[in-house]
Image (cartoon, rainbow, N blue to C red):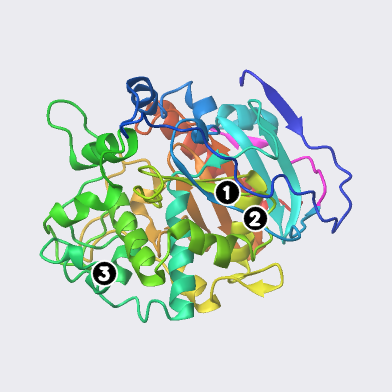
Amino acid sequence: MSFIKKGRLAAGIALGLVLPCVSVSAQTAPAHVLPDGTVPPALKAARMHILDAPENMLTFHNMDQLFETRPVPRSGPVAPFAHSDKALPDAVIGGTTMTEDAWEDRTYTAALLVMRDGHILHESYRDNTDASTHFISFSMAKTITSMLIGIAVGQGAIHSIDQPATDFVPELKGSGYDGVTIRQLLQMRSGVDYEERYDFGEKPSVPAQIFLNAIVANKERFADMAPRLGRKWKPGSHFNYSTLDTSVLGWVLERATKRPLADFMTQYLWQPMGMESYGYWLADGAPGVGRELNGMGYNATLRDFARLGQMMLDKGAFNGRQIVPADWVGAATTMTPNADPGTPPPPASVTSPFARSGYGFQIWKLDETGAYTALGLQGQFIYVHPATRTVIVKLSFFPPEGSAEGDRALEDTLAYFGTLTRWKG
């Protein structure tokens, strides 16, 4: 059971009402560095434990108190949602029937929003959060990066996603990224010798080194490792999930648009969509030094994440505007199987459905119904089910990846998503 729980929002918000703006711009984050530019030891120690349970019940919605940030301010009238409060169906998990409220507790839910055809049917918050709370997206940020790349392609800042990344980031020449195209980065098929495995100890793995040096200590940038790595597979031939690939996409975007990623996002995504609140990126260093952590670091409110999902459902259109090109949304949600041609599927002992899934442009195929999801570490979802025009946003605090409890929470979450898409409402 969650320690502090807030129930569903009261019904009665008038249909079509323009919602009040939570905040016009991002808060100014406190200074996170000492006068010599280093991160204080106590803060580094706190950053090391952001994923730990049960502390993640709090850290996942207080990231601006722990990290450098880059604001993404909102502007103008808020794009309204129609809203009614409905009782959701019971969940049947492992043969046991439970209320939706009990399912939220069982799956470590911080906030949940269920929407059908742009109409909010359910919205709830737990653990001292509310509609103004900003939640970490983790790897849902990868899908946002894909949206931004699509906008840049539509504007002509990127001529073609079949251009090599070195056209924009020549620092990658001679590395494993030399010759890798933007498309291959989007599909996680760079072929670079990198394994998303966070092994700490005397000889930390490459991702662990990046975490320690870029995210915890801010001694270098997340993408600085990219020019140092070699090649393991032929580009395009092998799916290999890599936050570093997404970080390189952010570097490409920065060079292509000739501006910081947060500024580009503010002007061409966040403000045109009529978001209700500001958002913010975590950064790997102080202003003028660090970059946005575009592979894992975006923070926003529950409803604004839902607006992104509705925009994807509506082929890139939202708030009366075409935000992301429709053909980009179509390409981004066209899935390529994870398994290489001719290779057997993962063994039955691998329980995650994503191991047998497919991947688009920084977005996951979920099942054979056409559903897809932006997916973040430890239970963050923007789930889109086009056949029923359902969007579900679930922001969670799962136990750490690889734990039995975390695996169970993922299975129970996806099972109930299926129930909600079959529910007639």
Assess whether mark 3 and mark 1 are in contact (beta carbons under 8 angstroms): no
Amino acid bearing label 1: Gly
Per the rendering, the mark at residue 165 is 3
Amino acid bearing label 3: Ala
Assess whether mark 2 and mark 3 are in contact (beta carbons under 8 angstroms): no
Eyeballing the image, is 405 above or below 219?
above
Assess whether mark 1 and mark 2 are in contact (beta carbons under 8 angstroms): yes
Could you say which is closer to the camera, residue 30 or residue 122? 30
Of the two numbered discs 3 and 2 in the rendering, the one whose residue sits closer to the viewer: 2
- The earlier-in-sequence mark between 3 and 2 is 2
Tell whether 180 sits left or right of 111.
Answer: left
Q: Which residue is mark 2?
A: 74
Q: Position of residue 407 (x, y in %)?
A: 42, 34
Residue at horizontal 68%, vertical 39%?
Answer: 132
Question: In the picture, residue 204 is in which quadrant?
Answer: top left
Quarter of the rendering occupied by the N terminus: top right
Residue at horizontal 40%, vertical 66%?
Answer: 335
Per the rendering, the mark at residue 279 is 1
Q: Position of residue 55 (x, y in %)?
A: 48, 22
Mark 3 falls on what kind of element? helix
Q: Is residue 330 magenta?
A: no
Could you say which is closer to the camera, residue 344 or residue 72? 72
Question: In the picture, residue 205 is in which quadrant?
Answer: top left
- The earlier-in-sequence mark between 1 and 3 is 3
Mark 1 falls on what kind of element? strand
Give me the C-alpha separation between circle 3 and circle 2: 31 Å
In the rendered structure, which segment of residues is drawn in magenta?
A: 83-94
Magenta stretch prevailing secondary structure: loop
